[in-house]
Image: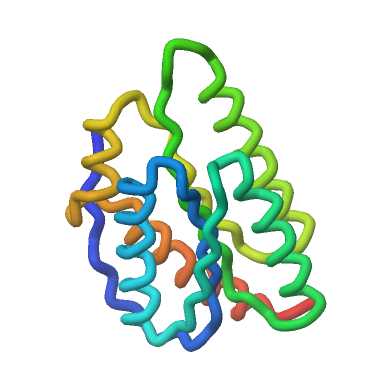
Amino acid sequence: MLTRVKNKKGAAHHGTFAIVASRYNARYVDGMTRAARKTLSGAGAQVQIVRVPGAYEIPVVAAKLARLSSDDHELSAIICLGVILRGETVHAAHIGEAVSQALMQIQLEYGVPVIHEVLLLENQAQAQKRCLDPRHNRGTEAAQTALEMARVMEGLGRS
């Protein structure tokens, strides 16, 4: 069952967050991106958006941002947004699994939270509900998770 996104009112966060968003299935990804940006901006955060062609390209950009963050300027979190719709072959499942494994590895390697909202969905109705419906928008949920993880990581200190 799909749960409703709760609007969490947390403390302001003045960190910098990156959103890596796919252009493929743009209608849906744009909906999540707008919601994520609105949530982060409402918390006082700075937001950098990087667009990539498709979901498969998200991890390489997330890794570069994480690497730069550990070298140069610290990112509070990286939010990855994409929509993969299943087709008649297993291609979508392979893309989804590869992206999931890569994003997990990036956050472990660089110590920067990577919020995974690259959705593998069955159909456009699911995409409509999760990406365009404000009551269930996964972009809002991703931004809330990013803000919470930024606070957790700050509490642990920089090492």
**13 left or right, relative to 75:** left
Q: Position of residue 51 (x, y in %)?
A: 52, 58
The residue shown at (38%, 30%) is 121
Residue 14 position in % (x across, y down)? 48, 88
Residue 48 vs residue 134, the one in the foreground: 48
Residue at horizontal 40 percent and vertical 87 percent from the top:
44
Horizontal side of 124 relative to 57 (left or right) equals: left
Compared across the picture, whether 136 is left or right of 21 comes to: left
Is 62 left, or right, of 51 in this rendering? right
| Quarter of the C terminus within the rendering | bottom right
Examine the rendered structure and indicate whether residue 31 appears above or below residue 146.
Answer: above
Front in this rendered view, residue 2 or 71: 71
Residue at (28%, 70%) from the top-left corner? 8
The answer to which quarter of the image holds residue 10 is bottom left
**Quadrant position of the N terminus in the picture:** top left
Q: Residue at x 63, y 75 (%)?
A: 75
Dividing the picture into quadrants, the one containing residue 153 is: bottom right
| 127 is higher (above) or lower (below) than 32 | above
Residue 50 coordinates in the image, percent (x, y): 55, 64
The x, y position of residue 109, in whole percent, is 78, 56
Q: How is the image coloured?
A: rainbow
Number of callouts: 0
